[in-house]
Image: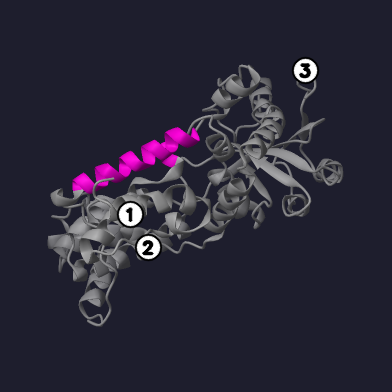
Amino acid sequence: MPDQMPHPTLVADDGALHTCVAALQHCTALAVDTEFMRTDTFFPILGLIQIYDGQHCWLIDPLAIDDLQPLVAVFTDPAISKVFHSCSEDLEVLQHTLGCLPAPLFDSQIAAALAGYGFSKGYAALVSDMLGVHVPKGETRSDWLQRPLSEAQLGYAASDVYYLLPVYQQLLADLAALGRTDWMGEEMSALAERANRRDDGGDYYRKVKGAWRLSPDELLVLQSLCQWREGEARHRNRPRNRILPDATLLDIAAKRPQGKAELSHVEGLHPGLIRRYGDTLLELLQTARQGQPSVQLEPLDTPLPKASRDLAKQLKTVVAERAEVLQLPVEILARKRDLEELVRSVCDGGVPVLPAALAQGWRHGVVGIPLLEAVSDPQH
């Protein structure tokens, strides 16, 4: 890392982008970040791509460049590691804009958790801990679609990638020393798989708060409503809840109104929304009523019964003990829903079954087996 952050190069036309790409193609690792806006849209709007190659900091302006496709060759080059920090949203905006998923990936937030620096560590905090450098946060809420971008914005954007490569190199060394390089590889494969998963909204109903209270028929209605809203949100490029909030869809599914007068009693459905969507909603409800009774959705998980809470607490203790021994955050070892799934398997069938996240990969030996032993031995 140079003693002083190099002045960033603004890439604001197609010729400059080709020059940038030609320089990047000789690198083995690139620090990457994006700035985007998503206030009133379903899809994120890319405002800037920042790339640091160890010598030059490139700030690529997607609003000024006609064709960003030359970047695809860099982002998909298997010989170049793409280093991000907390990259799920960056991947989404790049995939939407460029039509590709950067690979191979290295997420420094996940690596930091595996290396013992803490769970969900922010970029500035991680840089401070590892390099002793203060990273300013002044432009965090900037309007990245305004032009021209200010010097303060450009400096902030550059700092978001400038320190990422030395952090990456140190994390690689830390993971190797701890014998966790393979763990990181597994985590990155899982991250890429999640990012590649095509979501048509068919499973969104499972995320709606309180949906577990619905009957099987009502759940089918909620699924249909969620799929319709997903299509409408994508078509109109509006956030889901700007079409209809989750609570409104849940109330429609529970009440199943049969006319516009009954729609007016649904939570959050004001007259303007009824005028816009009333006929469509009633048509969806009518279709659901005439649907095939053979269609069944997998039941949603209900809150754990009181009788099983002691077992859940016991398993949390096992995870906490393993986390302490390994100097790892509890959260990266096992999620709450994974422990609940294991508890349910005991309550439902008496035979403990590890959830997929704990039944394979590095977590299986590290925490999955100890959890199975704890379930099998009540005196543990």
Q: CA distance from mark 3 to mark 2?
A: 48 Å
Residue at figure coordinates x 37%, y 63% from the top left: 203
Q: Is residue 274 above or below residue 184?
A: below
As for residue 107 lying within the magenta part, the answer is no
Image height check: is 308 above or below 347? above
Q: Visible in this render: residue 148?
A: no
Magenta extent: 309-331
The image quarter containing residue 201 is bottom left
Q: Position of residue 154 (x, y in %)?
A: 68, 26
User: What residue is shown with label 1?
Assistant: 207
Indicate which disc residue 294 carries: none
Judge left or right: residue 228 versus residue 190. left
Circle 3 is placed at which residue position? 4
163, above or below 51, in the image:
above
Mark 1 residue type: Lys
Residue 145, given in percent of the width and then of the height, sits at 59, 36
Q: Residue at x 61, y 16 (%)?
A: 134
Quarter of the rendering occupied by the N terminus? top right
Q: Is residue 330 magenta?
A: yes
